[in-house]
Amino acid sequence: MTDRRAQLAQNLSRVEERISAACAAAGRKRDEVTLVVVTKTYPASDVRLLAELGVRHVAENRDQEAASKAGECAGLTLDWHFVGQLQTNKARSVVSYADMVQSMDRLRLVTALSGAAVRAGREVGCLVQVALDAEEGDAGGRGGAAPEEVPEIADAIAGAEGLRLGGVMTVAPLSGVYAGRQRAAFDRLMEISARLRSEHPAANMVSAGMSSDLEDAVAAGATHVRVGTAVLGVRPRLR
């Protein structure tokens, strides 16, 4: 076993223990929460090691890096999630590898992604990214749509060819009333999810929580947690 493989295995074990403990504390079954490992800035060799260690869901936030990495890892049994802010002109590239786009936040993006998916002959899962620091009509500081905009965007996804509405996603905000209150933010996301499911019962995916706050997300009811640093290590500062 290489040093890197051993390191990743140890980190994955620790994260698994955290998720299992959080599920137990919340009275939930462990299989109710899916781990998505965020591999941005790390090489395809790490993705291959993660796959060997049983990881099935990986995420990226930059299309250029993601497209290259997915190509290098073709043939692996992986679901690729795109979690970054997405420009409409990248839609064609993203649908070539992404199984799930977690960062849908505007109608123009729905139109662009739908057209690209249809041309590629693919169906792509989509989550509406909710910005809990945004006022109506504005984007949040970390991307996403204001809570009031979620129904319209969700309806558009549900009615778009080539797309499948999966649910909602958020990133704990750094400003606004939920800054520093991750559990309250995730509880608010669950309220938004419940309203969405009343109109779209199959849209039951709730993506929330990262390395520092996954326990709060699991306690609130998240179905997916996005963990990068706790598995792969502290990322080098981007220049």
Image: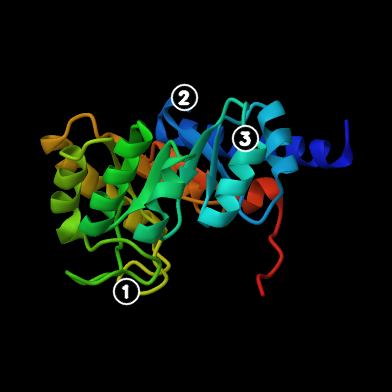
Q: Where on the picture, by quarter, is residue 10?
A: top right
For mark 1, what is the residue? 176
Q: Looking at the image, which residue is at 40% across and 67% down?
A: 142
Q: State the SS at label 2.
A: helix
What amino acid is at disc 3?
Glu
Q: Is residue 24 above or below residue 58?
A: above
How far, Cα to Cα, is label 2 from label 3? 13 Å
Going by the numbered disc 2, the residue's amino acid type is Asp
Neighbour class for label 1 at 10 Å: few (<14), some, many (≥20)? some
* Vertical relation: 91 (above or below) 218: below
Residue 17, numbered circle? 3
Q: Residues within 10 Å of mark 3 (few under 14, many from 20)?
A: few
- Marking on residue 25: none
What residue is disc 2 on? Answer: 31
Q: Is residue 29 left or right of residue 52?
A: left
Quick one: label 2 or label 1, which is nearer the N terminus?
Answer: 2
- Helix, strand or loop at label 1? It is loop
Q: Residue 78: x percent and y percent? A: 56, 30
